[in-house]
Amino acid sequence: MSRYHEIKFRLVTSFQRRIGNPLIRRLPNQTLLETTGRSSGLPRRTPVGGRRTGHEFWLVSEYGEKSQYVRNIQAHSRVRVRIGGRWHTGTAHLVPEDDPRARLRTLPRLNSAAVRAVGTDLLSVRVDLSD
């Protein structure tokens, strides 16, 4: 990762962790991804922008395998997703062979624009929903 991308990563993730995510998580209809912390084993909730398609939920990680929730998925693939205020359980899969830029065109516009603007290593994630 270039020095510019590293600085950008640190600034954006610090803002998200301390200010953005705590506020956005409180919105009643915000889509949330709940993973299990890879070290703590505690539930970790992250606001995400994605879309349900049948029994799948798709999202794009802006920092690929550097994202904390992606690292949690790698350790524990069982997740929950809150869509429209309702929780769904599923199994998350990283999909590096998917074109994340094409995937963003199918996801909600506002979030997709933010991911494109700040992301440096895009990675598609698919959650196979079991309910």
Image (cartoon, rainbow, N blue to C red):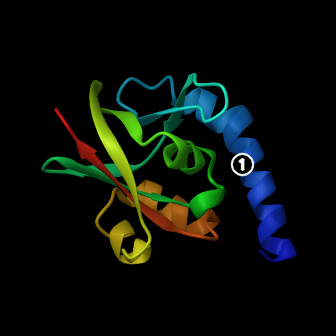
In this view, the residue in front, 36 or 57, is 36
State the image quarter where residue 110 is shown: bottom left
Q: Quadrant of the C terminus?
A: top left
- In the image, farthest residue toward the left: 54
Q: Position of residue 59 (x, y in %)?
A: 39, 55
For the image, the number of numbered tags is 1
Q: Looking at the picture, which amino acid does disc 1 mark?
A: Thr
What is the secondary structure assignment of the residue under circle 1?
Answer: helix
Can residue 31 be seen in this snapshot? no
Residue at the location (45% across, 26% down)? 27
State the quadrant of the N terminus. Answer: bottom right
Q: Which residue is mark 1?
A: 13
* Label 1 crowd (10 A; few <14 / some 14-19 / many >=20): some
Residue 86 in picture, x, y percent from top left: 26, 25
The structure residue drawn at horizontal position 28% and vertical position 66%, both measured from the top left corner, is: 106
Give the image quarter of residue 2. Answer: bottom right
> Taking 32 as reference, is 9 left or right?
right
